Amino acid sequence: MSSPGRFAASPPRPGFAHGARPSVPVARGVSVFVGTSVAGAARLPETRTPMLVVGLGDPVSDVLVQLDDAVAQRVFAKCGVDEPGGCLPVVSDDDITRLLTACAEAWVDGGYGEPDASTNHDTTNHTWEPSFCPGGSAANVCKGVVNLSAGCVSRFVGMIGSDDVGDRYQNALLKQNVETVLLRCADATVSSARCLSLVERDGRRTMRTFLGASLHLGASDFPSTQAFRGSPKLLHVEGYTLYRPELAKRAMREARARGALVSLDLASFEVVRNCRASLVAILNENLVDLVFANEDEARELLVGDTTSHEARGFHERRRKQGKKGGASESNEEGTAATRDEDKDTFTRADADDAMRWLLRFCRVATVSLGARGCVSLDRNGKKGIAPGVRVPVIDTTGAGDSFTAGYLAAYLNGATPQACASCGCAVGTQAVQAVGAELSTAKWHELALVVQDVIMLDRERNLALVEETAGAA
């Protein structure tokens, strides 16, 4: 949704005044800036969402270490990181502790060195101080939805260990207004999940994750009664749960039985590639209503399919763009080449094919396109297109989850795909300007007002269209 760089927000359209609220990347029917309402216009009642949203996923405590340019390479060398960026698993919680120790040693060994006049970078008063926040994809979505939607109840389900890490995680979620159903792992020797995230100045993250106790939550453990106490409106499942497909299916079936919608975030292209059979089985069972994918995940959906109409169109465009390096026409070699080449040229036509591929199984499909914004399409052909707004990136942790939260907050209030896409991009854009998947209470309040205004403008527009149609008849 956002990318590094400093770009001025688009100016407001006539009739809208700048206020204290963030600018919103929107298009086609919703104002570019959502601030003070048009002078003299009647304001709709405050949007309230008397609903329960449940999230299922891995309760991972994020340990965030910000790296200055002068110390980053030393930290990577101490931690044995040959290729910065990406996310890799580690064997035990001791590995996380060892990596944190290596970070501290690298900091003490070299500090920041001499100030770099060429970058004009202030090197004073910096200290080694990791920060902590409750993470995990579904938990981040729960935090976002509950803070964006007045009257919403958000509840997160997962498994933690019998340790201080798990206790701190639970307390931190409660402070973010998220109810918790966190089971304790039966094996007391298994630690709660942690993720060390090394964040460079340009926002790039290098992550090492120990999932620990979270992996011990199986289908038979799923606490249906506690999770769905009340009347659930939505179950949101993170894609990593596809590695435990029976757990995902049980939770989705239980939600369906209670009349709830189900949304699924595909998590990563590795998940799509490694769990394709489980994903297709779940989609074929009609257990999912909304699917969220980024461009890498959407590309992988099409790359791994050579038979559907949508996939054939995607592969044909790749062939027309020209084969780089003399890729073979054979299916196996051609598929590998498609993955490797044109990685930065995922087009809107490709996104449309990916959404149509998904709409064979679900109601709404959404593809985020990084700095280019997002596109969304429902089964009725209604489309949402929201451009990205380039901003200074501090940390991309949880940005995709924040996008999903903004989208769902609007969707659950009856907004169109266009308004939902606009809300998603607005929240995601703010998320990359904060460290970790944590926004301040004040920022959440600002964004909640943005979401409310977009929804109200969407309703006004739809009402005007209805009246215009009725008048014409």
Image: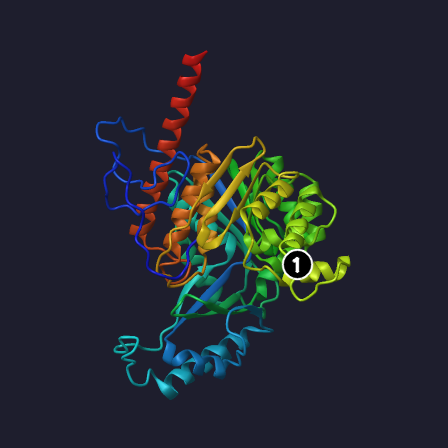
439 in relation to 124, above or below: above
User: Residue at horizontal 39%, vertical 80%?
Assistant: 71
Q: Where residue 287 appears, x then y in whole percent?
A: 64, 40
Is residue 257 visible to the viewer in this orientation of the structure? yes
| Front residue (pair 402, 419) | 419
Residue under label 1: 338
Q: Quadrant of residue 285?
A: top right
Residue occupying the far top of the picture = 473
Is 452 positioned to the left or the right of 290 in the image? left
Q: Amino acid at mark 1?
A: Thr
103 in relation to 202, above or below: below
Q: Where residue 404 appears, x then y in whole percent?
A: 48, 47
Q: Where residue 399 appears, x then y in whole percent?
A: 44, 55
| Front residue (pair 371, 174) | 371
Q: Where residue 233 appears, x then y in whole percent?
A: 51, 37
Q: Quadrant of residue 391?
A: bottom left
Q: Quadrant of residue 33?
A: top left
| Front residue (pair 93, 268) | 268
User: Residue at horizontal 57%, vertical 65%?
Assistant: 211
| Front residue (pair 245, 455) | 455
Is 196 positioned to the left or the right of 456 in the image? right
Indicate how the structure is coloured in the image: rainbow
33 in relation to 72, above or below: above
Is residue 153 visible to the viewer in this orientation of the structure? no
Q: Secondary structure at mark 1?
A: helix
| Number of residues whose C-alpha sits closer than 10 Å to that of mark 1, classed few (under 14), some (14–19) or many (20 or more) | many
User: Residue at horizontal 34%, vertical 37%?
Assistant: 31
